[in-house]
Amino acid sequence: MATKTPITLTVEAIDDLVYDARSGDLDALKSDLAVLSTQHSCPQAWIVASAIDSEPEEEGGTGSCLLHFPAANGNEEILNFLLAVLTQGETQLDQAQVAAVVNHRNHSGNTALHWAALNTHLECVKALVGAGADVAITNDAGLDAVFLAERADWSTEEQGEEPEEAEVEVEAEVQEGEANAGEMSKGRQVVEWLLSSEKGGALESAAGENTAAATEGSTQ
């Protein structure tokens, strides 16, 4: 379902914001948001919520919101800034509007969480879930974020790559017999965190169904 936007932005304005978010230029993003906020006499949150790359797919559009790009690139600074604009201060956006942006599905049905999980960016996954991302949403292929992270993990194993070291936030002592989180691949870290999150309890069975569906599809 498309996000209902508070205002209408020009294609050029949206393109500028998308470029800022994709390239990781925080200063330019802040400047463009401030200018557009003044022009439209509205909070910056409205600008963020309205900046959807809605051009048709055949014309190069992705259907993505601004959150998709830093989520895909692992740019925590840009992502956290945009989430703060949406959720903090005098945003004048209600909870449903914020949720609509955070869970916005692009032309392929992927949310920002899908892209963060597919690219195994754990901190971006955490930020999005903390802001209300729905871990159970599936894309047009019927896949959720957990499955995409698992697929990234499989790809790493098939290529024979050594898992890169990643900083892992340790919140409790690792129980005896558990694998060290630092030895996990990035994809596996994302999978384990999503499944252990408060919102991920119902995904265990769904992950199995996704795996079965993918296996069946690969044999056809």
Image: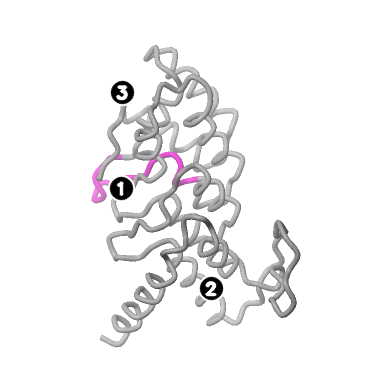
Kind of residue indicated by mark 2:
Asp
Q: Is residue 74 above or below residue 97?
A: below
Camera-nearest label, 2 or 1: 2
Kind of residue indicated by mark 3:
Ile
* Colouring: one colour
- Say which quarter of the image contains residue 13: top left
Q: Which residues are magenta?
A: 54-69
Question: In this image, 15 relative to 34: left or right?
Answer: left
Q: 182 and 208: which one is in front? A: 208
Q: Residue at x 50, y 76 (%)?
A: 155
Does the residue at mark 1 contact the one at mark 3 (Cβ under 8 Å)? no
Q: Secondary structure at mark 3?
A: loop
Q: Residue at x 26, y 42 (%)?
A: 2
Secondary structure that dominates the magenta span: loop
Kind of residue indicated by mark 1:
Gly
Measure how far apart labels 2 and 3 are at the Cα level. Answer: 40 Å
Q: Is residue 100 above or below residue 148?
A: above
Look at mark 3 in the image and give the residue it sits on.
Answer: 7
- Residue 64 position within the rendered picture, expressed as x and y whole percent measured from the top left: 36, 45
Give the numbered dot on residue 60. 1
- Residue 90 position within the rendered picture, expressed as x and y whole percent measured from the top left: 48, 19
Q: 57 and 117: which one is in front? A: 117
Give the numbered dot on residue 153. 2
Q: Secondary structure at mark 2?
A: helix
Question: In this image, 194 relative to 6: left or right?
Answer: right
- Residue 101 position within the rendered picture, expressed as x and y whole percent measured from the top left: 38, 39
Is 205 within the magenta? no
Earlier-in-chain disc, 2 versus 3 = 3
Q: Residues within 10 Å of mark 2 (few under 14, many from 20)?
A: many
Question: In this image, 169 relative to 72: left or right?
Answer: right
